[in-house]
Amino acid sequence: MNAKKLVVLVVEDSLLIISRILGVLEEAENVKLVIHASNFNESMKMINEINADVVLLDINLPDKSGIELLKVLKANHPHTKVIMLTNHASDNYRDLCTCMGADFFFDKSNDFEKIPEAINNLN
């Protein structure tokens, strides 16, 4: 199988979480490149410059909500896959993000191991 190699943008402000994400992304066979942004403004610039296939997105960003970024992302780049990865894993946030177009919604505390499989299944 010759699956497309994906460009992944990680939008996260915690260096510890970024390190964990990079570790689990090594298990995703179809990841070509991982790029990182630590806030809303930085991620908007990158999204417009780089055609990311997948965005791993935190809800809590230092300058604006990841939910606002999800809204802008889906309006301007509807084919980009979005994986919400957050500590705010309540049903309310899950429902809101899913309704807004998030492809997956994972809890940082429990779901890290689900990331590679989710990304591998996007092709």
Image (cartoon, helix red, strand yellow):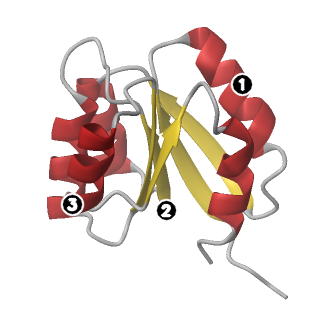
Of residue 48 and residue 62, the one placed in the foreground of this image is 62
User: At numbered mark 2, what does the secondary structure look like: helix, strand or loop?
Assistant: loop
User: Amino acid under label 3?
Assistant: Cys
Q: Earlier in the sequence, mark 3 or mark 1?
A: 1
> Label 3, label 1: how many angstroms apart (C-alpha)?
27 Å
Vertical placement of residue 26 versus 103, above or below: above
* Number of the front mark, 3 or 1: 3
User: At numbered mark 1, what does the secondary structure look like: helix, strand or loop?
Assistant: helix
Q: Earlier in the sequence, mark 3 or mark 2?
A: 2
- Residue named by callout 2: 53
- Name the residue located 56 percent from the left edge and 49 percent from the top edge: 8
Image coordinates of residue 68 in percent, x first then y, are 16, 38
User: At numbered mark 3, what does the secondary structure look like: helix, strand or loop?
Assistant: helix
- Residue 83 as seen in the image, left or right of residue 41: right
Vertical placement of residue 14 versus 80, above or below: above
- Residue 29 as seen in the image, left or right of residue 120: right
Image coordinates of residue 76 in percent, x first then y, are 18, 61
Image coordinates of residue 123 in percent, x first then y, are 62, 78
- Residue named by callout 1: 20
User: Amino acid under label 2?
Assistant: Asp
Image coordinates of residue 39 in percent, x first then y, are 33, 21
Of residue 88 and residue 2, the one placed in the foreground of this image is 88
> Label 1, label 2: how many angstroms apart (C-alpha)?
20 Å
- Residue named by callout 3: 99
- Name the residue located 68 percent from the left edge and 76 percent from the top edge: 4
